[in-house]
Image (tube, rainbow, N blue to C red):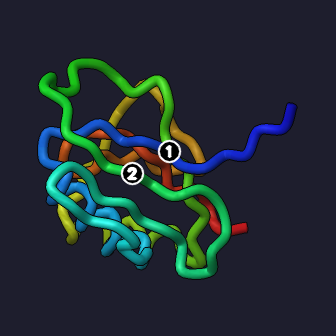
């Protein structure tokens, strides 16, 4: 048996706003958008897609799965994302080399230090 990772599904209260926010944040292409979902793809074609779907319940606890991103310039990228509507998050990480942020619906993600 062979498995291929196709997509990561993100549950949302407003899939339109979330999908467009992440498309702008990542500079990814919207490859499909309809009344039920938005799907984003890395313009290089690498990796799985992100699929945003509405769910009836809101987020209540820390995510059990989150995304990590490596920027060229961590400080500049954190400031850009904050200006777009991300917020800083404290999930008990203490002082680290990465910065934990939340997207507009509160989903945590990390901006790692440049490699």
Q: Nearer the viewer, residue 77 or 58?
A: 58
Q: In this view, which residue lies farthest toward the right?
A: 1
Q: Which residue is mark 2?
A: 51
Q: Residue at x 29, y 59 (%)?
A: 38
Q: Is residue 53 above or below residue 42?
A: above
Task: Say which mark, if any, is on residue 83.
Answer: none
How far across and down, in percent of the image, does residue 100 sit?
Answer: 42, 45
User: How many labels were placed on the picture?
Assistant: 2
Is the C terminus in the top left, top right, bottom left or bottom right quadrant?
A: bottom right
Mark 2 and mark 1: Cα distance apart in space: 6 Å
Which of the 4 quarters of the picture holds residue 34?
bottom left
Q: In this view, which residue lies farthest toward the top?
A: 61
Left or right, residue 35 beside residue 5: left
Is the N terminus in the top left, top right, bottom left or bottom right quadrant?
A: top right
Q: Residue at x 21, y 69 (%)?
A: 84
Mark 1: give few (<14), some (14-19) or many (20+) Cα within 10 Å.
Answer: few
Observer able to see residue 89: yes
Mark 2: give few (<14), some (14-19) or many (20+) Cα within 10 Å.
Answer: many
Label pair 2/1, CB-CB below 8 angstroms? yes
Query: Sequence order check: which comes first, mark 2 or mark 1?
Result: 1
Q: Secondary structure at mark 1?
A: strand
Q: Residue at x 60, y 50 (%)?
A: 6
How far across and down, in percent of the image, does residue 99 sit?
Answer: 46, 50
How far across and down, in percent of the image, does residue 40 sit?
Answer: 41, 65
Q: Nearer the viewer, residue 36 or 84?
A: 36
Q: Residue at x 39, y 51 (%)?
A: 51
Q: Is residue 110 above or below residue 21?
A: above
Which of the 4 quarters of the picture holds residue 83?
bottom left
Left or right, residue 64 beside residue 97: left
How far across and down, in percent of the image, does residue 79 sit?
Answer: 32, 70
Q: Secondary structure at mark 2?
A: strand
Q: Which residue is mark 1?
A: 8
């Amino acid at each position: 048996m062979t498995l291929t990772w196709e997509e990561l599904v993100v549950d949302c209260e407003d899939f339109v706003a979330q999908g467009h926010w992440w498309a702008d944040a990542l500079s990814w292409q919207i490859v499909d958008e309809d009344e039920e979902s938005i799907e984003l793809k890395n313009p290089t074609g690498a990796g799985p897609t992100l699929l945003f779907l509405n769910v009836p319940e809101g987020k209540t606890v820390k995510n059990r799965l989150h995304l990590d991103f490596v920027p060229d310039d961590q400080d500049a990228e954190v400031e850009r994302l904050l200006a777009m509507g991300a917020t800083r998050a404290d999930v008990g990480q203490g002082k680290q080399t990465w910065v934990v942020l939340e997207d507009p619906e509160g989903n945590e993600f990390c901006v790692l230090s440049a490699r």
